[in-house]
Amino acid sequence: MSKTETVIGVLALQGAFDVHAKKLQELGAQVRLVRKPEELVGLGGLVIPGGESTTFLKNLERVGFYDVLNEYVHKHPVFGTCAGCILLANEVTNPPQRSFAVLDVTVERNAYGRQNDSVILNEETSLPGGPLEMVFIRAPRISRHGADVKVLAERDGFPTLVQQGRLLAATFHPELTDDTRVHQHFLEIVAAESAK
Ligand code: GLN
């Protein structure tokens, strides 16, 4: 499949999917909102947006989507933000919950407490172009990461943007700022994977 034909899916069961779709379209990508298992077929990659991971799990199980998505995330480029990052993690704490266990991190849900429900920070990133604005909303914290996980940005010494091969995950919401670098980075991962 050539790069121009690549379609990026955005899981649209819950959460901030439309803003992701807009951002990807701004970058020239073709986007498909994914609400049913069969809509995963033929995608170059998938974005799992933020929202509420427990609600995602309930919805996925209700529509018989969990197992198909589980298989998908183990084989294709996936970008999980916030709740999406929680779904990809090897281990979830506070409290423990089911996850696809494909990204070698431990994620602590709602780790910043009520006093810090939502905050915008500017932090260094190894993505080119200087500091990155990060919007955290009831954010999880990556409390452990494996040796294969590359840290692309941090908050207080904890990773906020990580990559493990074709998997990208953020504990913040890159779709809510004007900065397109994180989505651009995901499109580059997808392009590299499609070229294999
Ligand atoms: N607190 C949510 C959860 O635990 C994640 C928040 C978000 O996606 N903005 O699933």
Image (spheres, rainbow, N blue to C red):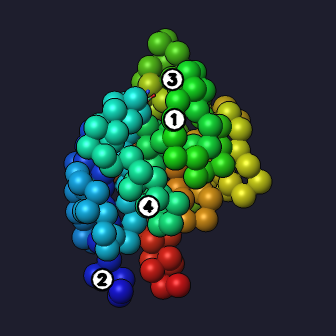
* Residue 111 x/y as whole percent: 56, 23
Q: Amino acid at mark 3?
A: Asn
Q: Which numbered dot is residue 72?
A: 4
Q: Residue at x 77, y 54 (%)?
A: 147
Question: Which comes before the other along the chain, label 4 or label 1?
Answer: 4
Q: Amino acid at mark 2?
A: Thr
Q: CA distance from mark 1 to mark 3?
A: 16 Å
**Are dots 2 and 1 in contact, CB under 8 Å?**
no
Q: CA distance from mark 2 to mark 1?
A: 36 Å
Q: Amino acid at mark 1?
A: Arg
| Residue 194 picture quarter | bottom left
Q: CA distance from mark 2 to mark 3?
A: 38 Å
Q: CA distance from mark 4 to mark 3?
A: 26 Å
Residue beneath disc 1: 98
Q: Amino acid at mark 4?
A: Tyr
Label 3 beta carbon less than 8 Å to ligand 1 = yes
Is residue 21 positioned above or below 136 on the image?
Answer: below
Is residue 46 positioned above or below 93 on the image?
Answer: below
Q: Which numbered dot is residue 110?
A: 3
Res 113 seen here: yes
| Label 2 vs label 1, nearer the camera | 1
Is residue 195 positioned above or below 82 on the image?
Answer: below
